[in-house]
Amino acid sequence: MKKFACIAATLITAAICQVAAAQWTPKSTIRIVVPFAAGGPTDITARHLSRKLNDILGQPVIVDNRGGANGMIGAELVVKSKPDGYTLLMPTSSTIAINPAVYRKMPFDPVADLSPITPVIATPGVMIVTPSLPARSVKDFVALAKARPGQIVFASTGAGSNTHLALELFAGEAKIKVTHVPYKGAGPAVTDVIAGHAQALVADLPVLAPHLKSGKLRPLAITGLDRTPLFPDIPSMKELGYPQVNSRNWYALLAPARTPPEIVNRLNEAVRQAVAAPEVRDRLVEIGAEIFTQSPEEFGKFLKSEIERWKGVVAKYKIAVEP
């Protein structure tokens, strides 16, 4: 009887521990590292999210901007942090899905060194041109580029970024030659296209939306499979005959590898709750974002598939970033 009593007591104790673990709650400030400068769409998303997470988790959630090296500086900081749920990473697809495809060496492995929590939002890219360029459609642009091979300056938000790869995808599918000029972020790239120093650009919709509404930039296509409700008159690349030009960007939340599952699951639950709140959801949708969440397991599989997809794109079009 004593033996059975001991076994029962052990089982009860284990069950109590499992319930306690499943109900993990933070005891101090949580830091979301955004591996880009303040003011960009990733930073804006993180700040909307952090304010709601403050209420849901009952602890301060702050945003820490650590930009540089296409997001790898901030990401490496999180990779080296303690896996306790208090230091998290909000990268874009460029940082953890495209970088492994375009760089021969990286300071970390996105799959092995990070614990996936969930994607947060996805944003369509938009191909735009300066209004002074005599192209009012993708068809016009392709004809102009073929008539002036290499003369159209096509900007990107950085070498190896999703906007760079979208350009290479489009140029490859359309069989045109343009001159790629990488900028250090969306801000200076957009400024130069508005001024006419560069003629074309692909960037995330939240960055471009104000300039599309003001008429300072002319949209040609959504670089994805579908139109966006925010600008329903802009056609998608798929319907224009370029289904491969799909560069939807996504922003996500991850933790250092070996973060306990109960912490990852609690954070996943909290993020889903936060983006479902009208005050967060409506603000994100207003800037052209789509709420996009998954379970940690689904996100892990999705991340691996995205890395392989971009590796295929880089190989097919022989895209070079490093010397």
Image (cartoon, rainbow, N blue to C red):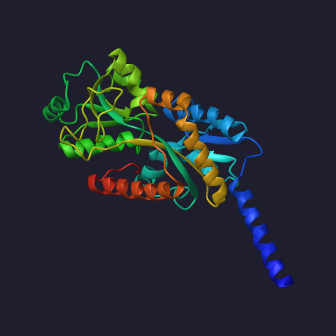
271 vs 103: above or below: above
The residue at the point 45 percent across, 26 percent down is: 286
Question: Which quadrant of the figure contains the N terminus?
Answer: bottom right
116 vs 9: above or below: above
Q: Which image quarter: residue 169?
A: top left
Picture coordinates of residue 51, whole percent (x, y): 64, 32
Depth check, front residue: 212 or 280: 280
Picture coordinates of residue 36, whole percent (x, y): 54, 37
Picture coordinates of residue 277, whole percent (x, y): 55, 33
Q: Residue furthest right?
A: 2
Depth check, front residue: 74 or 63: 63
Depth check, front residue: 213 or 59: 59
Q: Which image quarter: residue 18?
A: bottom right
290 vs 113: above or below: above
Q: In this image, 204 relative to 317: left or right?
A: right
The residue at the point 54 percent across, 37 percent down is: 275
Picture coordinates of residue 222, whole percent (x, y): 30, 34
Judge whether residue 127 can be spotted in this image: yes
Q: In this image, 96 relative to 113: left or right?
A: left
